[in-house]
Image (tube, rainbow, N blue to C red):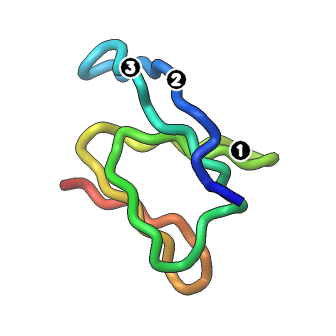
Amino acid sequence: REPLKGRRTVYFHERGPVSDVPVYDRYQLGAGATFDGPAVFEEHESTFVVGCDATVHVDAALNLIAELN
């Protein structure tokens, strides 16, 4: 199953509205996957929003690790 669920506009205090932000299904992300922000990761329990100046990678234990660029 494809991890990309869709796209939406997200508001970031520093930049205002950012259009066309990808929204990912957290349960479909595999180890080693990498994503540049901005992005939204959704799961049943929570939503993880990554800003414009960050990169996210999925580690071997399937944790999302965000790093500022």
- Residue receiving disc 3: 19
Q: Rounded to the nearest whole Å, what is the CA distance between mark 2 and mark 1? A: 17 Å
The residue indicated by pointer 2 is 8
Above or below 18: residue 26? below
Q: CA distance from mark 3 to mark 2?
A: 6 Å
Which residue is painted at 46% across and 70% down in the image?
A: 33
Residue mark closest to the camera, 2 vs 1 = 2
Circle nearer the N terminus (3, 2): 2
Q: Residue 62 in the image: state x and y as whole percent.
A: 60, 75
Does residue 13 appear left or right of residue 40 in this picture? left
**5 horizontally vs 23: left or right:** right
Residue 52 lies, in percent from the top left, at 28, 38
Kind of residue at disc 1: Ser
Callout 3 crowding tier (Cα within 10 Å): few <14, some 14–19, many ≥20: few
Per the model, the C-alpha gap separating discs 1 and 3 is 22 Å
The answer to whether 10 appears left or right of 25 in the picture is: left
Q: Decide which of 35, 51 is in the foreground and name it.
A: 35
Residue annotated with mark 1 = 46
Vertically, is 5 above or below 65? Answer: above
